[in-house]
Image (cartoon, rainbow, N blue to C red):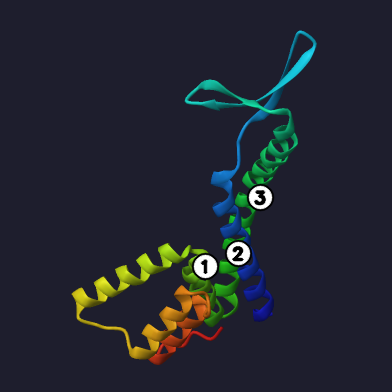
Amino acid sequence: MSAIIINEYQELLLKKNEIEQTLPSLPEGYISTKTIKEKQYYYLQNRVDGKITSKYLKENEVDIVKEQVELCKKYKAELPKIEARLKELEQAAKLIDKSIARHLTLLKLSCGMDSLSSVQKERSASFANALNAIEGIYASKTTEQNIDKWKVGDESFISIFQSTLNMYGFTAEV
């Protein structure tokens, strides 16, 4: 039972992360067609600050943009359903076993870290090092090596997160 909840939760988190990363690059609105002198012209139209904006589309762009607009609509409809299901699973985990709930929290905290760009990973690691220096608590050599592996994609963030928690006596079985 716990494996089913954890697997579904992890899949939903990955899907949510994918949607949230993809949505900003997708066009919103609809495609309109205008006929001028018996020739059709296509426009991507949407409402921005209460006004309708139009962007001319070349004929070879129309199908691609149409697919992207549909995907945007699909993702916007899907995202609230995913978020609601994630909350349901979190509530179920709390009722079934607190260790499952802790595991879901671990997944939620680490979700998205692996999909960061190399520049974002480097900035994240630098920021963490700066905070640790301020606090006077430095990462162990093993943790530093694992973070270096994560930055180049050789190690998942959650495995580093889990091993670091375990090293300090926190249980976070994955």
Question: Among all residues in the image, which is located at the extreme right?
Answer: 38
The x, y position of residue 110, in whole percent, is 48, 71
Residue at position x 40%, y 91% in the image = 167
* Circle 2 crowding by C-alpha within 10 Å: few under 14, some 14–19, many from 20: some
What is the C-alpha distance between the residues marked 3 and 2? 13 Å
What is the C-alpha distance between the residues marked 3 and 1? 18 Å
Question: Disc number at residue 78?
Answer: 3
What is the C-alpha distance between the residues marked 2 and 1? 7 Å
Q: Which amino acid type corresponds to the residue marked 1 in the rendered image?
A: Cys
* Circle 3 crowding by C-alpha within 10 Å: few under 14, some 14–19, many from 20: some
Q: Nearer the viewer, residue 152 or 116?
A: 152
Closer to us: mark 3 or mark 1? 1
Q: Which amino acid type corresponds to the residue marked 3 in the rendered image?
A: Glu
- Is residue 91 visible in this depiction of the protein? yes
Question: Dot 1 corresponds to which residue?
Answer: 111
15 left or right of 124 in image: right
Contact (CB < 8 A) between labels 2 and 1? Answer: yes
Question: Dot 2 corresponds to which residue?
Answer: 14
SS state under label 1? loop
Residue at position x 66%, y 74% in the image = 7
Residue at position x 65%, y 47% in the image = 75
Q: Which amino acid type corresponds to the residue marked 2 in the rendered image?
A: Leu
